[in-house]
Image (cartoon, rainbow, N blue to C red):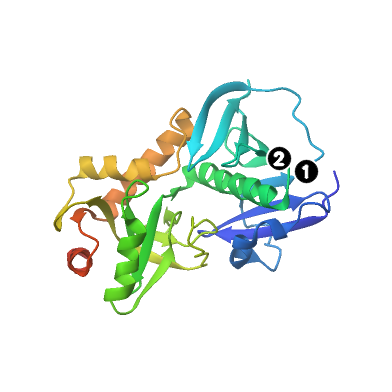
Amino acid sequence: MEVKQAIYYQVGRHVYLVDFCDDTNTSALLPSSEPFRLMDTPTDDVPLLFHLTVDDGWRPLKKGKEIGQFDCGGNNHGVYQLEDNSYQILVSDVAGHQCCLLQANADFSSAIVCLNGTDEMRHFGLNNAVMMMYAFSAADKDTVLMHASVIRKDDKGYLCLGVSGTGKSTHTQNWLKYIPGTDLMNDDNPVVRVCEDGVARVFGSPWSGKTPCYRNVEAPVGGFLQLKQAPYNKIERMKVVDAFASLLPSCSVMKWDSRDYVATCDTVTKLLERVPVFFLENLPDEAAVQMSYHAMSVTE
């Protein structure tokens, strides 16, 4: 196959390559990745997190065994596994239209994807494919992609956790409103990594949900905050066991894949050794923001 466009990106200090093999699909399908694009080709000593080839002419030789159908925010991911432990993932949008078929090797270091439909469908499919490649290839590199909204204050990143509808974005928006000197790093899928120097850091990413916050920024993690709506404000530091049970479901992980699951659990354990986790029962008001900010900043 002929490569028409080879684009390198760097997210969370990991470098990956996306090759485009026809004129229909280009890097224009990944506009939120532009802040993370490398203008220069990395030197040979820079390891690649993964290599993804985009080729609409590719077709799988056979279909894998179904692992399951997963609802990911209203869109469906059909996951299949082949005999060599490689994966096929069929991504459909909220309307049920099939947007892409991804086939990746067992550790997601290499994959090929074919896209389908309109430009909007292709963008949706490819963006999801790249996000999955990142999450599952980085799992054994002390890196997790988390479902969180993250705010920065005094060069520390604070991650708000909770299921959809909990009020993560509302809480971080209130930080912006009531705490001077804050900025939003990412509103849905930041990268969290225990770096080579042992410091837990949070990074902006190309994936930020409904809020267009695609910033190539980073900060040491100051704290995790598990949110729960309540008719009052109360905060407490979580015990390690409870904190583990809070952080793990917030990570993008394939529970049925032992390599991915064990590596993610190990990373969560390392994060808990370095960063406090708090549980906040709260109203969507200034008092809750002041309570969470002072609790986490004092702990540091």
For residue 236, above or below residue 65:
below
Q: Residue furthest right?
A: 2
Q: Nearer the viewer, residue 85 or 165?
A: 165
Q: Whole-percent x and y of residue 47?
A: 61, 53
Q: Whole-percent x and y of residue 96?
A: 61, 36
Q: Residue furthest front?
A: 95
Return the residue at label 2.
Answer: 112
Check disc 1 and report its element: helix, strand or loop. loop
Inspect the image, locate mark 2, and give the three-letter code of the amino acid beneath it. Ile
* Residue drawn at point x = 55 percent, y = 59 percent: 206
For residue 83, above or below residue 238:
above
Dividing the picture into quadrants, the one containing residue 234 is bottom left
Question: Quadrant where the N terminus lies?
Answer: top right
Inspect the image, locate mark 1, and give the three-letter code of the amino acid beneath it. Asp
Badge 1 crowding class, 10 Å Cα cut-off, few under 14, some 14 to 19, many 20 or more, is many
Q: Whole-percent x and y of residue 249?
A: 36, 40
Would you say residue 157 is visible in this rendering? no
* Residue drawn at point x = 50 percent, y = 41 percent: 74
Label whose residue precedes the other's in the sequence (2 or 1): 1
Q: Nearer the viewer, residue 193 or 225?
A: 225
Question: Quadrant where the C terminus lies?
Answer: bottom left
Return the mark for residue 224: none
